[in-house]
Amino acid sequence: MAVIGIVGLGVMGLGIAQVYAAAGHEVLLADAYAPARETAAQRIRDGLAPRVAVGKLPVDAMEALLARLKVVKISGLAPCDLVIEAIAEKLEAKQALFAAVEAVTDAALATNTSSLSVAAIAAGLKRPDRLVGLHFFNPAPVMKLVEFITLPGTDPQAAALARSLTEQAGKVVIACADTPGFIVNRCARPYYGEALALMEEGRNPGEIDAAMVAAGYRLGPFQLIDLVGADINLAATESLQAAMGGSPRYHIFPALRAQVTRGDLGRKTGRGFVYPDPLPEAPADAAAIVLRIEAMLANEAATLLAEGGSTMTGIDTALELGLNFPRGPFESGRRHGRSAILTELLRLEAAAPGDLKPRYAICPALGPALQSPL
Ligand SMILES: NC(=O)c1ccc[n+]([C@@H]2O[C@H](COP(=O)([O-])OP(=O)(O)OC[C@H]3O[C@@H](n4cnc5c(N)ncnc54)[C@H](O)[C@@H]3O)[C@@H](O)[C@H]2O)c1
């Protein structure tokens, strides 16, 4: 059994701590904020209580799990094999934290950042080769996917340890490059973006959602935006667009901005694009809506694939596990067929206004990807 350190005891840090403690490891917990340290064990206990109540987790297993947790100072992380940070999403804070951590331990280091560059976080370290990215999804104990980011100079032993401990804890670890949004947060963009484009062309958001749900998606694009919050979706799209040099592939559609300005953010404000209304019947042209959105998903996935560091299977699995998609973008593309996907993208490019035409440009890797084995 290993010793795992977790720094940052917010929603993600506590969830990640629970994952490794449930796998039998000793977990040392640290946070800069005293109330976060003092309430950590109780918050994990409260999170486990419903599973105990329905008999899914025996009381003694819960007590054993909680007994493996211990709050320490940063200096107390010395015996760790792996230290994972889940502190505030600020580059300087993460750099300063890892500088302090590497001074006290020889452990492998991992960041749970969602939007910062792992290389930038590693840059100031004495041993930058010890740092990898382990990007968990919320809620960490439930979500199977962990995106795994290594850098060209990463120490193979540190990488192997971080990967194997996480796989042994029951997660599906998918390698990806250190590029903005990693796999899921990037490849998901067309799901929302193309739905917003359709809406701006006059389509009803409920019908768009109904078309995707009829094609096997658990939630339509607007239902997903309403679940997470239009403000969060806008911030994620803006951050990715800025990181990708303003590319129209991550265009901010005015309909999204207007929704945020109106304050109709989704479930948390009681009204969203479609929430709280039930979805209508799927429209007669549902197949065309699905083809359009899935063509864009496949094109974005091919663009990421062409950049290196990930595989078709990895990208498909990441979207299935990270977003509950019924199939990944490459599998969807193959179902439609290479010719149908390429023809649809050409049609969209021809129909788009001038500034949005590059949004639909076919990635050169798309055609070959849809023909080669997964
Ligand atoms: N919330 C999500 O859905 C999600 C998903 C994946 C990744 N992430 C990433 O995980 C990280 C944490 O997110 P969160 O939502 O759990 O945040 P949070 O605000 O819930 O918790 C952050 C915790 O870190 C502590 N902290 C902040 N700065 C610190 C420092 N310098 N030293 C020690 N402790 C410090 C805070 O006291 C707090 O307890 C971020 O990098 C975020 O981008 C979040």
Image: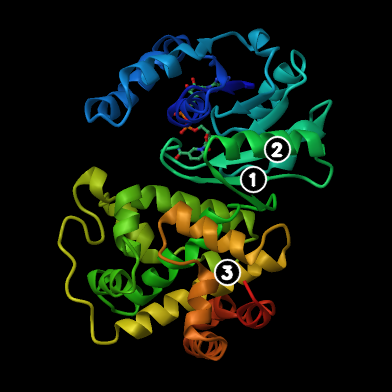
Dividing the image into 4 quarters, which one contains the C terminus? Answer: bottom right
The residue lying toward the viewer, choosing from 253 and 12, is 12
Q: How far apart are the alpha carbons under marks 2 and 3? A: 25 Å
Q: State if disc 1 and disc 2 touch (CB < 8 Å).
A: yes
Residue 290: percent from left, percent from top: 38, 78
Q: Is residue 23 left or right of residue 232?
A: right
Q: Which residue is mark 1?
A: 148
Residue 113 visible somewhere in the drawing: no
Looking at the picture, does residue 171 appear above or below residue 353? above
Q: Residues within 10 Å of mark 2 (few under 14, many from 20)?
A: many
Of pointers 3 and 1, the one earlier in the residue sequence: 1
Q: Which residue is mark 2?
A: 132
Looking at the picture, does residue 374 appear above or below residue 234? below
Q: Which mark is residue 310?
A: none
Looking at the picture, does residue 354 appear above or below residue 35? below
Of pointers 2 and 1, the one earlier in the residue sequence: 2
Residue 196 falls in which quadrant of the image?
bottom left
Q: Amino acid at mark 1?
A: Phe
